[in-house]
Image: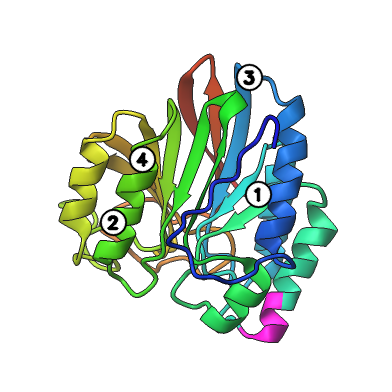
Amino acid sequence: MIGLLLLLSLFLPAVSYADTLYHRSSAQLEERSRHAATDDYCFVVMGDSRGNDVVFKKALTAAAGFNPLFILHGGDYSAEGGEEETASFLKLLQRHIPGIPVFVVPGNHENPKFFTKEIGPSYFAFSVPRLGLKVVALDNSNEALSPAELDYLSKELASAPGSTFVAMHVPPETKRWRGHSFTKGAAELEQVIAAAPTVRGLFFAHSHLYDETIFGGVPAFISGGAGAPLVWMSRYGERVNHIIVVRVKKGKVSYQMVQLK
């Protein structure tokens, strides 16, 4: 496939995703990437949109204003992930951002049955060789990273280009991020990231706030402010509805938190 190779690991379950959001978004990304400037493009990150469609619509409208290559959703698009909530989520995407690819990382509120049927695989990787871009998404929605997920990440990073990003729902426990985080596999994740020179950013959700830190020597972000009730209080971060705009310009990556008005 010229200009775009969507890389799915051989370790993915033998399930057809032909009618899923992932499949449709992959085709859209192929088309959009053909017209993207190789030295200046952006994508948008957001997460935890469940519970407030008004805020989520603002997030989608704000994202569309940046004409992103794609949107990366960090999970928890619904409270229970049932059929009706999933259909509502897909209708909102179609209504407010038609033509913009959306890739979703599974959250702890998702229903695996409907996620794989309507949204896509629980972990995946895609790349755009023309742009030197790769995204690897893992499933740690059970608040742990299994050896299989870590092995998958290591294999994907072995062939990673210069602008590679990693995403999953639950942030790792660190000196800064304590509570609402995961520990099983966190130290191993940090080691894998530290050993991968092409990883430029890490994205998490789960906590309903915005925060940034360094993890494994790489900028790491929590983006959980796309609609879910914001945290009452936290020892870190900002209690704000927001999206993150990630811009890659002449090989340099910048991050902009955009507060929703």
Seen in the image, is 117 located left or right of residue 189?
right
Query: CA–CA distance between discs 3 and 1?
Result: 31 Å
Mark 2 touches mark 1? (CB < 8 Å): no
Provide the residue designation for mark 4.
157
> Disc 4 or disc 3, which is closer to the eye?
4
- Residue 253: percent from left, percent from top: 46, 25
**Which quadrant of the figure has residue 11?**
bottom left
Query: Type of residue at label 4?
Result: Leu
- Stretch of the chain drawn in magenta: 82-86
- Residue 32: percent from left, percent from top: 75, 35
Assess whether residue 83 is covered by the magenta stretch.
Answer: yes
Query: Type of residue at label 1?
Result: Lys
Seen in the image, is 223 located left or right of residue 237?
right
| Helix, strand or loop for disc 1 | loop
> Which badge, 4 or 2, is on the more N-terminal residue?
2
Assess whether residue 153 is covered by the magenta stretch.
Answer: no
Provide the residue designation for mark 1.
261
Residue 235 visible in the snapshot: yes
Query: CA–CA distance between discs 2 and 3?
Result: 30 Å
Residue 150: mark in rendering: 2
> Disc 2 or disc 1, which is closer to the eye?
2
From this view, report whether residue 104 is shown above or below residue 228. above
Seen in the image, is 68 located left or right of residue 116?
right
How crowded pointer 1 is (Cα within 10 Å; few <14, some 14-19, many 20+) is rated as few
> Which badge, 4 or 3, is on the more N-terminal residue?
3
**Which quadrant of the figure has residue 83?**
bottom right
Query: Type of residue at label 2?
Result: Leu
Provide the residue designation for mark 3.
38
